[in-house]
Image: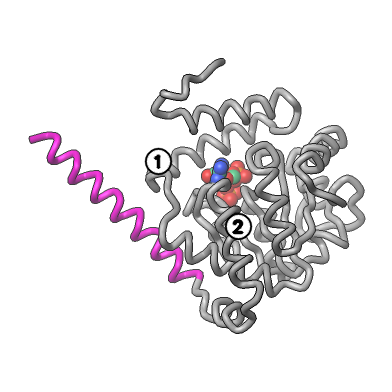
Amino acid sequence: MKIPPTHPRYTSLMTREKLVRAWKAGVAVPEGLIAHGRGEAFDYLFGEETSAPALVAEKAAAAFLVRGKRPVISVNGNVAALAAREVVHLAKAIPAKIEVNLFHRSAARMNRIVRLLGTAGARDVLGPRPDARIPGLDSKRALAHRAGIHGADVVLVPLEDGDRAEALVRMGKVVISVDLNPLSRTTMMATVPIVDELTRALPTVEKFVKELRGDPKEVERISRTYDKAGNLKAVYSYLGWRLKGLMKTQQHRGR
Ligand code: ATP
């Protein structure tokens, strides 16, 4: 379908097209399309903008990634389809390893995603030959690399499911999530939950990484003072404020 650039929802429709194409190419799975719809719904509520509390979480995430000894970025089908370039840029800036980690895992899909990341400039992407298991997860969902997610001290898990995020936290890792759902189990479980849209969040974290790389004192200060509960409270009150604003607009229109 050709989407006219003048369409008021052009960007959002193009993103959907990208995902549908990724599904046809065997990169994304139908479940990923459903998950995207859930994200879109929450982004409407956020006004499709990065909130101030999300910015705070993104800066904290950058501090934890910079201070990490073995940081890893986890990539699934939707992340590869929507933000392969952003992942590669962020991984280079930190620097961090990239591991493809699939809920619906098959060798063919794994190889397609590794190739896609390679085209975006990634080298030595982990995922195809796992040599370890994440405790507490069943079957293929547990597979990981010792040199990657399994051995990492800090893991960035964009669009992760709650179970796996929880299992990584149980292993003692600093888990940074990107998930627009402020109520998801992933957001609840993560050490640093970023409640923001993927393609806005990753470049913002990258910008903060570049800023913080040369400032170890600030990195220590941010990671010491980051307050997850306080930050999530701020996300909820931002949503409340947005909804109140929308209520007022409707009242004016009704007059
Ligand atoms: P959980 O298991 O964490 O409770 P879930 O079952 O919703 O949540 P998934 O089905 O893996 O987990 O969904 C991934 C999450 O990613 C969804 O909560 C959705 O809101 C979010 N999401 C989808 N697309 C984006 C995006 N582009 N940016 C940020 N978040 C997104």
Name the residue that disc number 1 marks: 44
Does residue 32 appear to the left or right of 103 in the view shown?
Answer: left
Q: Which quadrant holds the C terminus?
A: top left
Quadrant for ligand 1 reads top right
Q: Could you say whether the residue bearing mark 2 is in a helix, strand or loop?
A: strand
Residue 225 is covered by the magenta coloring: no
Give the image's coloring scheme. Answer: one colour
Q: Which mark is residue 177?
A: 2
Q: Residue furthest top?
A: 1
Residue 200 placement (x, y as % from top left):
53, 49
Question: What residue do we see at 92% from left, 55% from top?
Answer: 131
Camera sees residue 191:
no
Residue 218 placement (x, y as % from top left):
57, 80
Residue 15 placement (x, y as % from top left):
56, 32
Residue 250 placement (x, y as % from top left):
19, 39
Question: What residue do we see at 63% from left, 25% from top?
Answer: 20
- The mark that comes first in sequence, 2 or 1, is 1
Q: Could you say whether the residue bearing mark 1 is in a helix, strand or loop?
A: helix
Give, as a single range, the part of the protein colored magenta. Answer: 228-255
Kindly check if marks 2 and 1 are in contact, taking CB atoms under 8 A apart as contact: no
Q: Amino acid at mark 1?
A: Tyr
